[in-house]
Image (tube, coloured by chain):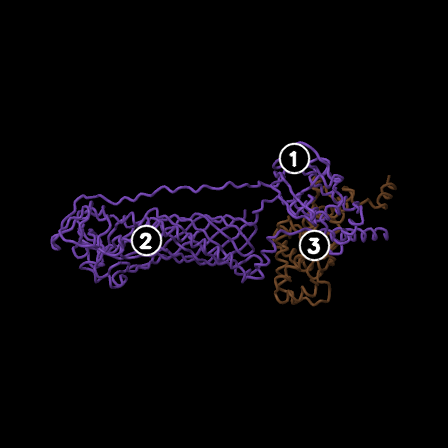
Amino acid sequence: METKNNNIENFEKFLREKTDEFRMYPSKRVWYSIYNDIHPGNRLPSISMTVVLIGFLFLIGFLNTTETAKENNIPKQDIASSGNVVVASNTLPEKNTAGYSTTETGSQLSSNNRANLVNSSSESNPTVAGNSSEGLHRTTQPKTAASGTSTTAIAGRTSLTITNAIAEDATNNPVAEITTDNTVVINKENNTAAFEPTTGNPSFNNSGAALSPAGNDITVTTSNFNDENILAEKSSSIAAVNVQSIDLGATAGTDIPGGLNAEKEVNATNTGTPNTDKQLAAAESVKNKNQITWKEKAWMDDFVLHNKPVARKWAGRAGLQAYITPSVVYRRITNNAIDKQLAGTNSNFNNFNANDFVKHKPSFGIETGLSIQYDISRRIRIKAGAQFNYTRYNAFAYETNHPVAATLTMNADDNIMTYEAFRTSNYTNIYGNYSTKLHNETYQLSIPVGADYKLANISDNVSWYAGATIQPTIVLFAKSFVLSTDRRSYIQDPTLLNRLNMNAGFETYFSFDKGGYSLQLGPQYRMQLFSTNTKMYSLEERLQNFGVKLGLTKKL
Amino acid sequence: MTEEQMLAGCLQNDAASQDSLYSRFSPRMLGVCYRFAKNREDAEDMLQEGFIKVFSQIHQYRSEGALEGWIRRIMVHTCINALKKNKKFSDCVDIAYAGNVGIREESIPSIMQAKEVVECIRSLPLGYRTVLNLYAIEGFSHKEIGYMLDIEESTSRSQYTRAKSMLEDILIKKKILQRPKEKITHISAAM
């Protein structure tokens, strides 16, 4: 029994000793994450980069929107469909332009976008332009691709090649070095006793660790590679190293046979003895500094190399989320007329708040989609995906049995003038045959890209996040009614629709983790950054959604 | 930088001191985390969380014991908390489950000494190796282990006995340990 107890004690002592000897070197990512966590104020670079990225996305969205607006600036359909497009003499510039017939002179019409407009010399008797449909065609010059520079990529650890390794000591004699990246640079002339020249293709020697620079054809065998002091001494005076690549001589998916074999290296640690006084002094110096030797370091690196986790690097960090956000959709209407004073006979309406003339009610909307999430640190998660959006708000109006004339205040594309375009409508705002409810609705597809920040860990399984996304959006279909100049009519005009838009989403939510899944629940605010309609229309409408987001994330 | 200087710097939230402390202790602490973790990545996550606790609670260190021991305790508790987040872990430390576990020969790593011992420990079932790590290596009592893992003290004892037996077998198969003489004698006597 006593013997048995001693054995148990010895066993535990043995385990303690062996495990105490065991060390691993963490990757730099760990320290960076710790540093960011304990010094949150020093995250400026990453925040700046995020701001730049979001700004860039804004710019792209803005440019796309501007392009669309300009393309839609030609009111040819107005002329062709109704034949009622009239340019009031006091709203249009008076200048002879191609296709613009007038006897008066002026200086304000500079764009040939008006080529299809015909001016009337009499305000009370407008002239119909007919089917003049010559429009402005914008052409985009093909962009010249910049010539790129070729780059070299190292694909994985299994295919590396050493060529042209150069190392020099203080006396400019080439020596040897082992770097922390498993890179071995050796000069065969100064280390003939330790390194054995070979010929042939660079490859690993099955009998031991062997790295063969293609140019110099040097192989390092395990038996010759066990004197740490030679290399420690040499490496201390390395002046320059130029390593282009390393060939480990193994194909992808296979283990490296005997490559820097850890067992042999550890044995070498135990048996390796200094050969000279100088080497002994060097070894002593290393020990005095209380530092690990290159061999221990190489062992650790080798251990990492051969014991990479089977799991994929992104496993546990990535997740696939499906979500749905029921919401209430509001809209904000503001006057965007460039020239409120010269907007024709109804110009006074441009000076009043359009909301005072209408009766709009918020309605429901929905957002649903899939997103890929990735935890780049303990607190920050980036995400991107595809999202379908439905928005709607209601306008209370009256329907008439016959069309009534109406005008729309439009901004000229020269950004100086406004003018009125004639339309007809069956929906009025103040009277009609019977009341009706108009649904202003859009069907959108967007690509939300953003990030979440973990604000707090509520408990082991519950975390609190805040997040934001930027959402480039394309409007697939819309049924949108716009207000006439006198605010008395609702007109449906698809040509005024802004097909490309940009939205921003802000959310905060609680995440409940359970097994490999997490459930997300929290409020979300989504705002449309650009108007529903193009800049050509004088009223700017921006939608705002307030919703509750429910998401289910599966960790990948 | 001495340990006192590092401590003083860390108390003032000095990044250089924190870096120095981290550089000094992280290799050994990662080794501790690695023995508990499923893989290296999980071990690094545990290490990261543990060091954040170390730096945020450094003012609670009273200099009564070794700094490394204090840090190590934090790391172990961090590892246990991380393991307990996984529901499967509680099943693994259950004695009913422990009776049926086995070890596959091919899962035993074939490498050397310290690393080999660690890998042999890691080849044990999760519940076994956690109890073994805590009792045999970290020096916790079975009562403390029971409290930490929410299991009975007797369960901890039983788990450890089985873990130790299994680990001995593995180490003997790997020729790291020799079979105890009394066992050989016992077998000889039986024959």
Which label sits on residue B28?
Answer: 3
Q: Nearer the viewer, mark 1 or mark 3?
A: 1
Mark 2: few, some, or many residues within 10 Å (few <14, many ≥20)? many
- Name the residue at the front extreme: A171
Colour assigned to chain B in the rendering is brown
| Element assignment for label 1 | loop
Same subunit: marks 3 and 2 = no
In-front residue for pair A547/A238: A238
Q: x, y (%) of residue A551?
A: 47, 52
In-front residue for pair B60/B2: B2
Query: Label 3, label 2: how many angstroms apart (C-alpha)?
Result: 60 Å
Which label sits on residue A202?
Answer: 1
The answer to whether residue A201 is above or below residue B47 is above
Q: Amino acid at mark 1?
A: Pro
Left or right, A275 with respect to A450, comes to right
Q: Amino acid at mark 2?
A: Thr
Q: Which residue: 20% across, 45% down?
A: A80
Quadrant position of residue B140? bottom right
To which chain does the residue with label 2 belong? A
- The answer to whether one can see residue A268 in this image is yes
| Element assignment for label 3 | helix
**Dot 2 corresponds to which residue?**
A532
In-front residue for pair A551/B111: B111
The answer to whether residue A302 is above or below residue A200 is below
